[in-house]
Amino acid sequence: MTMQHFNMLMVILLLLGFPFHPIVAQLSTAAPPNLWEVSNMYNGAYGILPVLQNSSSSYITSFGFYTIDGHSFTLSVVFSALVSQGAETPVIWSANPDNPVSQDAILNFTREGHLLLHDGDGTVIWSTATKSKSVAGMGLDVSGNLVLFDQNNSPVWQSFDHPTDTLVLGQSLCRGKSLRAKPSSTKWPGARVYFSAELDGLQYSFKPAAYTQLFQASPTSTYISTCYAFANGSFGFPDTIFSLPSARSQLWVPRFMRLESDGHLRLYEMGQMELLMVLDVLSIAMNFCDYPLACGDYGVCSNAQCSCPSLSYFRFQNERHPGDGCIPLRSISCHHAHNHRLIPLDNVSYFSHSTFVSLATPGSENVCKQSCLIDCSCKAVLYQSYGPGSDSGYCMLLSEQNLILFSGNISNPIPAFIKIQDKRSEQRRIIIAVGSTIAGFSLTSILVCAVVWKKCKKDEEQLFDGIPGIPKRFPYGQLKVATSDFSVKLGGGGFGSVFKGKIGKETIAVKRLEGVEQGMEEFLAEVMTIGRTHHFNLVRLVGFCAEKSHRLLVYEYLSNGSLDKWIFHTSPVFTLSWKTRRNIIIAIARSLSYLHEECKEKIAHLDIKPQNILLDDKFNAKLSDFGLSKMINRDQSKVMTRMRGTRGYLAPEWLGSKITEKADIYSFGIVMMEIICGRENLDESQPEESIHLISLLQEKARSGQLFDLVDSGSNDMKLHMEEVMETMKLAMWSLQVDSSRRPLMSTVVKVLEGVMSLEATPDCTFVASFASSNTDVVGSGSSYVPSESHLSAPR
């Protein structure tokens, strides 16, 4: 909107009877060059540190640094009462609402007319992008519009064109712009609700659900507008979409509409002593349950009332405020997924049935439910079959970002199932197992089992004598001495502990398996697999011990430990350079190419993760831990096996337990992303919408914002951004949900070495809410997922 359009609007509003104070036309100004430092302005008080101020007879409009805690600051425009200091100070616009700055921040109005906000470390947080646009000055009018103007006093940039969550009287909402509700700590971690201008009206939307409501002046209106003005008595001018109460005072007082964290658009008027809520604008046309956030997390909305899914498993977060949502009586733990259970919910829906169908994906009910049980972020399942007798239907997994349910008089309810943490099932299994053991054993059977067990142990020890090409076998006593009675522990995990030792002049790492149910199988796999492979990028197995109950593996010692401690920022004084990260990626790609394509039998590692990638003193990477590996004959297209691996690194095809070596390629893609981004795939310390890195990658890839994911703690990576982006695209190829579309590891190596290039952009689907129809899927008969192994110390 140009200054001429703004003045024309003022005239129209005056004709409509709105009493503007004459000072609206005045500006408080500043000229470039100029600079404001927060540290020089802050005096310990909370509120606004003004850069510019303007006033009417009763109110002050200020532009400057706003703080409520004295530690973080936003560059904002605020209203405040001139007479009373007790009234609320509403923020009507912010340059950096989602990225506050510190006390060391600087606002720089450059000689070229560029307004820049720098944080204390020099990072540019926000700018007007007006460099070389002949900016002569900056001004603030009493209505709250911050304007950069040229020599002719024409606006070059103005804050009214860039609304955040608020519209001020006299401001327009134009097409391509939207109000965005600020997040609430009791509801959602990030913006979810938007209010935008469209050609055919004003649109309310809830992004995770693709839920929208369109408001028009009349259903038959053919009027097309690109801007909708907030005028006295109406919103939507020159047409009227919402009728509003007229101002009560004949003097100019600030009026504004704010889209708030609960999804309501409220009209406010500044009073002398308090901020007055005049009208809940959208409630003219929307019912209580039409607001997606009406009942909060896990809440079910019905007839303007909030309830919890089941009082046996949930309770209100705040009994006095049911709209704050519900919480499970037992927290859902991703580390105890075997105790997850789905309970049915009757007579519910997800917005409209058409919204559900548009967002759901086809699949079977069994696979749909199983997908939710193994996906930590999934909180509920909606599933509706195609028709009577059909074994396929619409499946939709709900996370906390889109966990919205409605109940009551629903014309087309959708069967729903909500996840709970069920401790009783575990207790029942223990009781049954113990009871059966006590009842079933007699003295005779115990004696027989003792004889059989002794014979089995002897057979196990003799088994290793028949394996050709296995490494050296050590007596237990020798390893006990070599490790000083296992006194220097390097790390520990799901299958045992690792100790440092020395045999002759060689430093070794000894892994001792301890009380693992599947220990013998993993031990055999390790000895038979890595003991007969020889590659620079595979950890060398020096030998092993299989003596009585003792199971130990002896590896070469790698002084820099495992990769996770170097890429997940546990060491603040040192970060890996891009060259080192890329060399690590190439090394692991070569090791997997060797296992998959150069051995007599294909070897699937099945537990690729940073904890199993070890680094020597020169940061050469070597793949370790073959306890879960599987040999695959070259004439086999797929192999059937129980689910194995680590949460956060499993390929989608594990849902059906039929896998190929390409499950490794998916896990490798995840590790590539972790190396590039400097964070774990599943990081519950992140905001809710960012916990799952690969889901975030999918979102950023589709919106063209891949740069946002690159490790911000490494300046070196920014210097090699083109190469980083190419490597990220290669990771995206490796993360294809359809395993047949993933490249061979030998192809990955050639691309990384520059022998081949990527010819096309990969499909941006990396996360399957359930197994796709073109993948062989059977219901997984096993819920066994090995516990995570964090062997991060040197080994």
Image: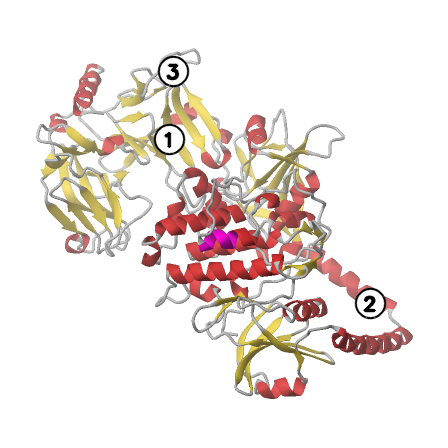
Residue 776 disc label: none
Q: Nearer the viewer, residue 683 or 473?
A: 473
Provide the secondary structure element on which disc 3 rests: loop
Residue marked by disc 3: 217
Provide the secondary structure element on which disc 2 rests: helix
Under mark 3, the amino acid is Ala
Task: State which region is magenta.
Answer: 748-753
The mark closer to the camera, 1 or 3, is 3
Q: Mark 2 or mark 1, which has the lower sequence index?
A: 1
Q: Mark 2 or mark 3, which has the lower sequence index?
A: 3
Under mark 1, the amino acid is Leu
Q: Residues within 10 Å of mark 3 (few under 14, many from 20)?
A: some
Percent coordinates x, y for residue 678 in the rendering? 42, 57
Q: Quadrant of the N terminus?
A: top left
In-image side of 579 versus 610 (left or right): left
The mark closer to the camera, 2 or 1, is 2
Residue marked by disc 1: 265
Q: Residues within 10 Å of mark 1 (few under 14, many from 20)?
A: many
User: Residues under labels 1 and 3: Cα distance?
Assistant: 18 Å
Residue marked by disc 2: 437
Colouring of the image? secondary structure
Q: Nearer the viewer, residue 238 or 713?
A: 713
Q: Nearer the viewer, residue 519 or 231?
A: 519
Q: Nearer the viewer, residue 453 or 653?
A: 653
Percent coordinates x, y for residue 611 in the rendering? 53, 65
Task: Give the residue displayed 32% in from the left and 57% down from the top.
Answer: 715
Q: Residue furthest front?
A: 755
Under mark 2, the amino acid is Thr
In the image, is residue 446 part of the stretch drawn in magenta?
no
